Amino acid sequence: MTIDLETQEEISRLNEAVDEFALEMKARLREQAVKGYRGWDDPENYERILDLLVKQAPASEGEEVDIANLAMILWSMRRGR
């Protein structure tokens, strides 16, 4: 499939945004791990993490990285990682 220049540029901007966002996610996860937060991958914490996501999402202005991290954790658990 041939992709035109405009679409290629759009994809590049999307990839750059995702890469930058992922760096922020990793930094925030590191901060939380250093604070002692553990158990993100424990299936017993799934419901608690889901509740956190549901509660934080509506008021997420400025907390987009935290919301994304909660979503990543749930996604990872459902994949069986």
Image (tube, helix red, strand yellow):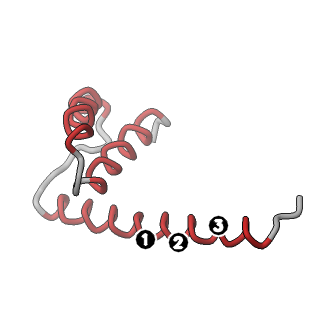
Residue annotated with mark 3: 10
Within 10 Å of the Cα at label 2, are there few (<14), some (14-19), or many (20+) other Cα atoms? few
Residue 20, which numbered label? 1
Within 10 Å of the Cα at label 3, are there few (<14), some (14-19), or many (20+) other Cα atoms? few
- Mark 3 is on which residue type? Glu
Question: Quarter holding the C terminus?
Answer: top left
Q: From the image, state whether disc 3 or disc 2 is nearer to you.
A: 3
Q: Is 55 positioned to the left or the right of 8 in the image? A: left
Q: Quadrant of residue 25?
A: bottom left
- Mark 1 is on which residue type? Glu
Question: Quarter holding the N terminus?
Answer: bottom right
- Give the Cα distance between marks 3 and 1: 15 Å
Is the residue under label 2 in contact with that under label 1 (CB below 8 Å)? yes
Q: Quadrant of residue 36?
A: bottom left
Q: Position of residue 54 (x, y in %)?
A: 26, 32
Residue 16, which numbered label? 2
